[in-house]
Image: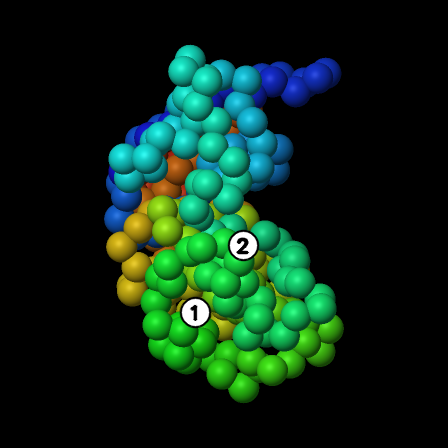
Amino acid sequence: MVVFDYTKKFEGGPSLHLKAEIDGRGLVAVLGPSGSGKTTLAKLLAGLLPPDEGRCEVNGTVSDDTARSVALKHEEHRLGFVFQNHRLFPGMTVRENILYPVKYGGRTPLADFCDLVKTLRIEALLERMPATLSGGEAQRVSLARALSAAQNMLILDEPTASLDPALRGDLVECVGAIAQKTRFPILYITHTAREALELAETAVFLSGGRILETGPTKEILQRHGYLYGE
């Protein structure tokens, strides 16, 4: 279970109040218009952005509690994060990138290495450098590295945004395969109704720095204008 109640204020703009309880099993789509607070929520959960007030608990681990001065560092959150741009270490091979959280971060591998690279279809890329990869290949490697880091949760912040339709479908298929294998929460931020429907039974909808509702993905998509005539 993921339970959070965050307040974050930005100079010259409205404050965000993000509160929800999310089942700790499977993949949840995070939806909402641009500027609604989706990426801010992801950064708060990941420890990349401190809340002004609030508390967060992920599967029994309290990562933030401003009332008790609890604020775990990003690496102590023990989660994986996939950004819109892959952010791989340019001086490391694909293999070294994937194993970095295990070798240097003390993480216990979520899955067998061979099984992971097979699921993501990157066996042939292991000795290559990031600069030689296509966009789709780099995002699959980024996902593999995030899974090597993830112990409590995986967050994907619009991972297909910079990919063409064919590569986008390939990555979504890989994410779906991973979601079937894991037992912890996966938050998938997207603007795309098709991705949300394909991957998630449950969705969270944000608007104006607030979480308006959590519920079945198709119902939320219909209520907020993502689907028409269905």
Choose the circle earlier in sequence order: 2 or 1: 2
Label 1, residues with CA under 10 Å away: few <14, some 14-19, many ≥20: some
Q: Amino acid at mark 1?
A: Cys
Residue nearest the observer in this picture, 220 or 38: 38
Query: Up-down: is 46 above or below 230?
Result: above
Residue 174, label in figure: 1
Q: Which x, y percent locates residue 169?
A: 50, 69
Seen from this angle, which residue lies furthest top? 67
The residues tagged by marks 2 and 1 sit, at their Cα atoms, a distance apart of 13 Å
Residue 221 position within the rendered picture, expressed as x and y whole percent measured from the top left: 41, 43
> Mark 2: few, some, or many residues within 10 Å (few <14, many ≥20)?
many
Q: Which quadrant of the figure contains the N terminus? A: top left
Q: Is residue 191 in view from this perspective?
A: yes
Position of residue 7 in the picture relative to residue 89 (left or right)? left
Residue at point 66%, 70% (across, down) = 92
Which one is in front, 110 or 197?
110
Residue hosting label 2: 82
Label placed on residue 71: none
Instruction: Quadrant for residue 117, please give it.
Output: bottom left
The residue that appears at 50% across and 54% down in the rendered structure is 105
